[in-house]
C-alpha cells in the first residue's frame, strides 16, 4: 500500500490496509501546488541578491480539494480540458508526486502506462533495454527471464532485438516500451493517452492486450479526451476543470454533462 | 517516500542495471570500446605531465616518479568531480523518466557514483601497473600499507555519494550551480592537492605564518577529505607508509556526515523537487 500523505502533515494511515473492504484509491481533500516558474529564484545570484519572502501569488494550485474513492472492479475515466490537472492526478496516483495538502491513499501495485520508452538508453540494444526498463519497473530478473521471449515476440522486433535502439524508428521504440510495460499484471492500471502505439496492426494488438489487462486488474484509471472511448470502458468518471473536481460519478451521467457543455464558450472564459 | 533506505535496498537490481547499462553504453559508443576505460586516464596523465614537467619544469625531482604521483590525484579527483558535475544536471535530464515511472530516484545519483567508481578502478589498475614500471626510490619496501587502499576507497565512495545526492537536488533548485561548480571543482583539484604534495603546503604555511597559525591553517587544509584520500593513496602505493590515525578519524567523521546528510537532503527533496523539473 502506498499512503501518500501531504508533505506538511506526514500523516500515516497504515491501519486501513488491514480492512479488506477498504477502497483501492482514496483521495481526501487532495491539493498540489506549483511555484510559478517566472517568480521563483532560478539561480544562486537571484537567490542571494533578490531576497524576498515567497507569498501566495508565487504559487498556483494544479489540483485542489480533490475527493474521490475508487473501489475494486471500478474503471474510472478522467476527462477535462488541457491544463485541468489530469496528468498531475496520474502522477499522484503513481506516487510520483505527493500532495501538498490532504491525503492520497493508493492500495496496490500501480502500473502507469504514461510515457513509454523514457527509460531507454539509445546506445544499447533492444535486449539490453528490455532489461533496463524492466529494472525500472521493478520486474525481478527471474520473472523477466521467463517473459523475455514473449516480450520480444509481442514487440515484433525479433530481427532487430540485438541492434542498438538508436537505429529503431519511433514506432519500434514505442512497441518495445509497450511490450515491457504491459508484461506484468498490475493491480492498479493507469493509462494516460498511450493507446495509439505503433501502426494500425500493432494498435489493434495493443488494445486487445490493454483490455485483457483491464479484466485482470483491480481498478483502472484512464485519461482521455475521447468520450466515446471512456463511455465504452469506464464505470465512473471524474471531470476535472482548472485543478478541481467539476463532477464525479457514474460514467454515463458525467459524460452526458461533459458533452453538453459549450467547450468553446468555456475556453473563452 | 520512494527513496527511503528500505526501498533503495529492495531495488538494488535497478542500481546494478543502471551501472551495467552505463558501462555497456560507453563501450557501444566508441570504436575502441573498453580500451578507452584505460586509455582515458593514461592520456589525461600524459597531458598534465607534459604541461607541468615539460612546460614549467616543476615537480619532477621532489615527487619522482611524477607521472604516478600526479596520476593518483587525477583519477581520485576525476571520480568525485565527474559524479558531482553530472549530478547537478542529472534529475533535469531525466525528467521524462522520473515523471513516467515510479521508482526511488535516489538510485540515479548513486548509479553515477558507482559507474564512475568502476572507471576509477580501471584507472587504479593502470596506476598499479605504472607503479611497477616506475618504482619509487622513497618506497619503504613495506607492502602492508597497501591494506589501507580498500578503506580509503570506501570513504571516497561515501563522500562522493553524499555530495552527489545533495547536489542532484540543489542542481534542480538552483540552475546556476552547474556553471559555478566547474570553477569550484577546478580549484578543488589544485587544493586537494593534485599537482603537489601536502609537505609543500605545510612547508609554505609554516614559512609564511607565525607558529601557531601555520599549523592551524594546515589542520583546516587537511579537513578536505580529498587531501587525506589522495595523500593516503600516495602513501600506500608510492611510499609504502601508513597515514596517521587522526586522519582516519577525520575521514570517518566527514564520510558519515556527508553520506548521512546527503541522504537526508535527498529524502527531504525526493518528491518535492519533481515539481520544479
Image (cartoon, grey):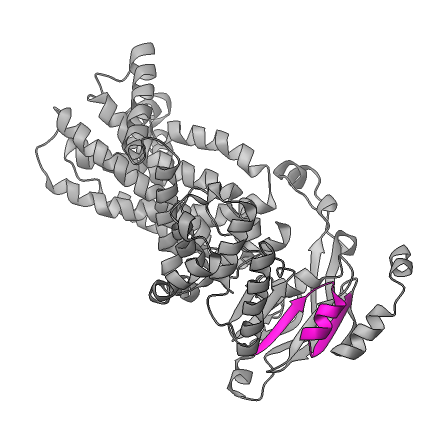
Tell me where residue B64 sits by quadrant.
top left
Q: Is residue B24 left or right of residue A4?
A: left
Relative vertical location of residue A253 with respect to residue B227 in this rendering, above or below: below
Q: Nearer the viewer, residue A263 or B262?
A: A263
Q: Residue at 42% of width from left, 47% of height from top?
A: A160
Q: Is residue B199 magenta?
A: no
Q: Is residue B91 visible?
A: yes
Q: Nearer the viewer, residue A212 or B129?
A: A212
Relative vertical location of residue A208 with respect to residue A153 in this rendering, above or below: below
Q: Is residue A228 magenta?
A: yes
First to last magenta residue range:
A218-240
Q: Is residue B63 visible?
A: no
**Farthest residue, direction front:** A201
Q: Nearer the viewer, residue B191 or B30?
A: B30
Q: Residue at 42% of width from left, 32% of height from top?
A: B188
Q: Is residue A206 left or right of residue B64?
A: right
Tell me where residue B147 sits by quadrant.
top left
Q: Is residue A75 left or right of residue B237?
A: right
Q: Is residue B137 left or right of residue B99?
A: left
Amino acid at each position: 500500500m502506498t499512503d501518500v500523505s501531504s508533505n506538511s502533515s506526514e500523516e500515516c494511515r497504515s491501519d486501513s490496509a488491514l480492512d479488506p473492504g477498504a477502497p483501492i484509491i482514496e483521495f481526501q481533500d487532495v491539493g498540489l501546488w506549483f511555484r510559478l516558474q517566472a517568480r521563483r529564484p532560478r539561480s544562486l545570484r537571484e537567490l542571494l541578491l533578490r531576497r524576498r519572502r515567497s507569498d501566495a501569488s508565487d504559487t498556483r494550485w494544479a489540483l485542489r480539494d480533490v475527493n474521490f474513492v475508487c473501489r475494486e472492479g471500478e474503471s474510472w475515466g478522467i476527462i477535462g480540458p488541457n491544463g485541468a490537472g489530469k496528468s498531475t492526478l496520474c502522477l499522484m496516483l503513481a506516487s510520483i508526486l505527493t500532495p501538498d495538502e490532504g491525503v492520497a491513499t493508493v492500495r496496490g501495485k500501480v502500473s502507469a502506462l504514461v510515457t513509454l520508452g523514457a527509460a531507454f538508453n539509445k546506445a544499447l540494444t533492444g535486449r539490453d533495454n528490455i532489461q533496463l526498463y524492466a529494472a525500472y519497473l521493478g520486474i525481478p530478473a527471474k520473472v523477466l527471464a521467463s517473459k523475455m521471449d514473449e516480450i520480444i515476440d509481442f514487440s515484433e522486433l525479433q530481427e532487430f532485438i540485438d541492434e542498438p535502439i538508436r537505429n529503431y524508428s519511433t514506432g519500434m521504440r514505442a512497441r518495445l516500451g509497450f511490450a515491457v510495460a504491459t508484461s506484468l499484471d498490475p493491480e492498479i492500471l493507469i493509462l494516460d493517452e498511450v493507446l495509439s502505439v505503433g501502426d494500425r496492426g500493432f494498435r489493434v494488438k495493443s488494445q486487445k492486450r490493454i483490455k485483457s489487462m483491464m479484466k485482470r486488474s483491480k481498478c483502472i484509471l484512464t485519461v482521455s479526451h475521447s468520450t466515446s472511448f471512456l463511455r465504452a470502458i469506464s464505470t465512473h468518471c471524474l471531470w476535472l476543470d482548472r485543478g478541481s473536481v467539476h463532477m464525479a460519478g457514474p460514467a454515463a451521467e458525467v459524460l452526458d454533462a461533459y458533452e453538453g457543455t459549450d467547450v468553446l464558450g468555456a475556453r473563452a472564459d | 517516500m520512494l527513496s527511503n533506505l528500505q526501498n533503495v535496498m529492495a531495488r538494488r537490481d535497478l542500481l546494478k542495471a543502471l551501472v551495467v547499462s552505463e558501462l555497456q553504453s560507453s563501450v557501444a559508443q566508441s570504436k575502441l570500446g573498453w580500451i578507452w576505460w584505460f586509455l582515458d586516464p593514461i592520456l589525461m596523465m600524459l597531458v598534465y605531465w607534459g604541461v607541468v614537467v615539460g612546460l614549467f619544469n616543476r615537480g619532477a625531482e621532489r615527487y619522482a616518479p611524477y607521472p604516478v604521483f600526479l596520476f593518483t590525484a587525477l583519477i581520485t579527483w576525476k571520480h568525485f568531480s565527474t559524479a558531482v558535475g553530472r549530478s547537478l544536471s542529472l534529475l533535469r535530464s531525466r525528467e521524462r523518466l522520473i515523471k513516467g515511472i515510479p521508482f526511488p530516484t535516489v538510485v540515479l545519483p548513486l548509479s553515477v557514483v558507482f559507474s564512475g567508481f568502476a572507471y576509477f578502478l580501471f584507472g587504479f589498475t593502470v596506476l598499479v601497473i605504472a607503479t611497477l614500471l616506475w618504482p619509487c626510490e622513497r618506497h619503504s619496501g613495506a607492502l602492508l600499507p597497501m591494506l589501507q587502499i580498500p578503506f580509503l576507497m570506501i570513504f571516497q565512495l561515501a563522500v562522493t555519494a553524499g555530495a552527489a545526492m545533495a547536489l542532484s537536488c540543489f542542481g534542480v533548485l538552483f540552475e546556476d550551480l552547474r556553471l559555478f561548480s566547474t570553477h569550484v571543482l577546478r580549484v578543488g583539484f589544485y587544493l586537494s592537492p593534485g599537482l603537489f604534495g601536502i609537505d609543500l603546503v605545510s612547508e609554505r604555511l609554516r614559512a609564511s605564518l607565525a607558529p601557531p597559525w601555520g599549523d592551524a591553517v594546515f589542520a583546516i587544509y587537511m579537513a578536505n577529505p580529498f587531501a587525506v584520500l589522495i595523500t593516503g593513496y600516495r602513501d600506500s602505493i608510492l611510499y609504502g607508509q601508513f597515514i596517521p590515525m587522526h586522519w582516519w578519524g577525520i575521514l570517518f567523521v566527514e564520510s558519515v556526515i556527508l553520506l548521512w546528510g546527503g541522504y537526508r537532503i535527498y529524502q527531504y527533496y525526493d518528491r518535492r523537487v519533481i515539481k520544479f523539473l
